[in-house]
Image: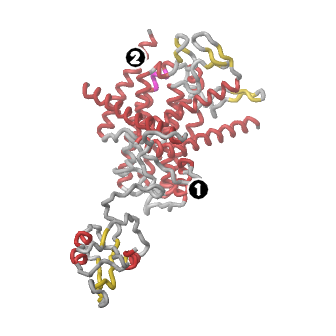
């Protein structure tokens, strides 16, 4: 009998919780609809394509290759990123530039296959030249074809 | 001739009111659940870029359901399979005929009753039609050629029959108190007042009866917490094999039952279209003030009161649906047979003893 009474009280308590949520949220919704600014909004929803949540500073997003002051890529083709990549999605082809005194080696091709990339960030950690970073804050990378997900030197240097 | 036209107009208006309310209950359900759970809810459906807080969502849903494939499973009983959703739909849609929307009004020297048929067995008719809705469940479960649906249908039938008893018995106390089964007379009776100030509504006459009726009625609508027949999220229910508009009709039936139950609660327990202290010629406040109003204003106030009460109970039923978890099957049966029905008998006995004193 006591048990039944407890159940009954909990039923009422449950209804009270949902009613409170309804009334409080409706109050803020109504105020916002009337153009009155409130301490908080009626819902925690972020209306995604229109408003976007700020991405954290350290978030690992789309890769980019950094340039030197003269505009050439900083990459010296040491192949550490391609070696450390667990999904083996980095493909680099080296080329030689005899006119440069400091770094003769430069990448002729640098392709990251984003359809394979798992965004672990190991390539960034491995890079001794700080040539590769993942701080573009771009996360909407969907494409209609897989070939469009092969990011080459031109795309990565942007 | 003109009588027929009036009846036709009343049927069309009542059905339009009923179906529009049903349509927008789907919207209300989405929005209310969203507000309860700190979300926004469906707001993307638009006409020419006009969104209006998702008010076009029911139309988007309807268009989607109309253009879906209307699939009939192989080796099913085709005729019964097609008949089932219509049976379900029809028996609920007809019940609106006996609900009184307002007082009698006089237009051009002709008394018009704001009720499609004012039959002297109104209450029994509604209960009978609501029980006939069980055929839709059984037929759809049986004709789908699927073992899960037939088990779902049987579950539904068992639940409906169990709670039908409680539903009927919870109203017996009310029938003892009220002078008639005619719904218009029941509403008129509730226009009186205790000690000149407390309206003689069913809730004050039969508080226990109201609670019992509420629980039994919630079970009758087959929605959460009593949604074992369909169990849309996990267990497979009786309309698993339906798609498109036929599935939509089962869904509509659920929402129509919500509306009809709200109408019934309003009519039987909350004074129907009666506004407290509002008499035919205006407000008569208990402290002696009389506030005379024209007849038209009184009628409009009464119609508004009826609508407001019905909306409130629709809101309340959706609140219940989004608050409580589903019963287990044995809990459902225990609740129905071991708690509701004995309490119904207690209520009947108590009412009878008090009335005979």
Q: Where is residue B306 in the image (x, y as percent from the top left)?
A: 58, 30
Q: Using a 10 Å C-alpha cutoff, classify the residue at mark 2 as few (fewer than 14 neighbours), some (14 to 19) or many (20 or more).
A: few
Indicate whether B45 appears above or below B134: below
Q: Which residues are drawn in magenta?
A: B171-175
Q: Quadrant of residue A158?
A: bottom left
The residue at the far right in this view is: B108
For disc 1, the chain is: B
Which one is in front, B73 or A29?
A29
Q: Quadrant of residue B282?
A: top right
For the residues bearing labels 2 and 1, Cβ distance under 8 angstroms? no
In what quadrant of the picture does the C terminus of chain B appear?
A: top left
Indicate whether B277 appears above or below B38: above
Indicate the secondary structure of the residue bearing disc 2.
Answer: helix
Q: Mark 2 points at which residue?
A: B350
User: Is residue B172 a member of the stretch shown in magenta?
Assistant: yes
Q: Which residue is drawn at 27% across and 72% down?
A: A130
Which one is in front, B221 or B26?
B26
Indicate whether B188 appears above or below B41: above
Q: Position of residue B126 (x, y in %)?
A: 52, 34
Q: Quadrant of residue B304?
A: top right
Q: Where is residue B232 in the image (x, y as percent from the top left)?
A: 39, 50
Indicate the secondary structure of the residue bearing disc 1.
Answer: loop
Inspect this view and state whether residue A150 appears: no
For disc 2, the chain is: B
Q: Residue B49: which disc?
A: 1
In-image side of A97 versus A158 (left or right): left
The residue at the far bottom in this view is: A98
Which one is in front, A76 or A148?
A76
Which one is in front, B263 or A16?
A16
Q: Is the magenta stretch mostly helix, strand or loop?
A: helix
């Amino acid at each position: 009998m006591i048990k039944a009474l407890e159940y009954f009280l909990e039923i009422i308590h449950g209804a009270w919780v949902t009613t409170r949520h309804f009334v409080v949220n409706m109050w803020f919704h109504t105020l916002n609809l009337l153009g009155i600014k409130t301490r908080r909004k009626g819902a925690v929803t972020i209306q995604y394509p229109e408003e976007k949540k700020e991405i954290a500073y350290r978030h690992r997003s789309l890769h980019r290759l950094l340039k030197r002051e003269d505009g050439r890529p900083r990459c010296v083709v040491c192949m550490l990123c391609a070696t450390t990549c667990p999904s083996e999605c980095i493909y680099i082809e080296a080329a030689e530039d005899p006119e440069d005194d400091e770094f003769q080696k430069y990448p002729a091709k640098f392709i990251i296959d984003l359809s394979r990339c798992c965004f672990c960030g190991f390539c960034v950690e491995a890079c001794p030249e700080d040539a590769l970073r993942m701080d573009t804050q771009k996360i909407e990378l969907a494409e209609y074809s897989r070939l469009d997900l092969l990011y080459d030197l031109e795309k990565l240097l942007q | 001739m003109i009588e027929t036209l009036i009846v036709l107009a009343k049927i069309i208006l009542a059905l339009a009111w009923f179906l529009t309310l049903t349509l927008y209950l789907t919207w209300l359900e989405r929005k209310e659940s969203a507000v309860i759970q700190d979300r926004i809810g469906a707001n993307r459906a638009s006409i020419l870029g006009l969104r209006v807080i998702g008010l076009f969502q029911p139309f988007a849903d309807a268009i989607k359901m109309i253009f879906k494939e209307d699939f009939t499973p192989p080796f099913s009983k085709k005729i019964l399979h097609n008949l089932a959703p219509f049976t379900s739909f029809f028996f609920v849609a007809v019940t609106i005929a006996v609900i009184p929307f307002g007082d009698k009004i006089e237009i051009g020297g002709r008394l018009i009753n704001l009720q499609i048929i004012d039959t002297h067995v109104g209450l029994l008719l509604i209960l009978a039609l609501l029980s006939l809705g069980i055929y839709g469940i059984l037929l759809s479960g049986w004709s789908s050629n699927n073992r899960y649906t037939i088990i779902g249908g049987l579950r539904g039938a068992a639940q409906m029959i169990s709670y039908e008893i409680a539903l009927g018995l919870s109203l017996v106390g009310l029938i003892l108190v009220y002078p008639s089964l005619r719904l218009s007379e029941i509403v008129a009776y509730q226009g009186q007042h205790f000690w000149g100030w407390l309206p003689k509504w069913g809730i004050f006459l039969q508080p226990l009866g109201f609670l019992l009726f509420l629980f039994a009625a919630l079970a009758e609508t087959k929605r959460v917490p009593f949604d074992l027949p369909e169990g849309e999220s996990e267990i497979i229910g009786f309309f698993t094999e339906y798609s498109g508009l036929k599935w939509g009709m089962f869904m509509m039936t659920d929402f129509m039952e919500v509306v009809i139950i709200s109408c019934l609660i309003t009519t039987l327990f909350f004074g129907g279209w009666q506004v407290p202290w509002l008499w035919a010629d205006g407000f008569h406040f208990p402290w002696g003030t009389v506030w005379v109003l024209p007849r038209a204003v009184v009628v409009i106030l009464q119609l508004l009161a009826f609508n407001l009460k019905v909306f409130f109970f629709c809101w309340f039923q959706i609140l219940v649906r989004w608050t409580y978890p589903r019963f287990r099957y044995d809990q459902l049966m225990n609740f129905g047979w071991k708690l509701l029905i004995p309490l119904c008998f207690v209520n009947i006995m108590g009412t009878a003893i008090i009335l005979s004193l």
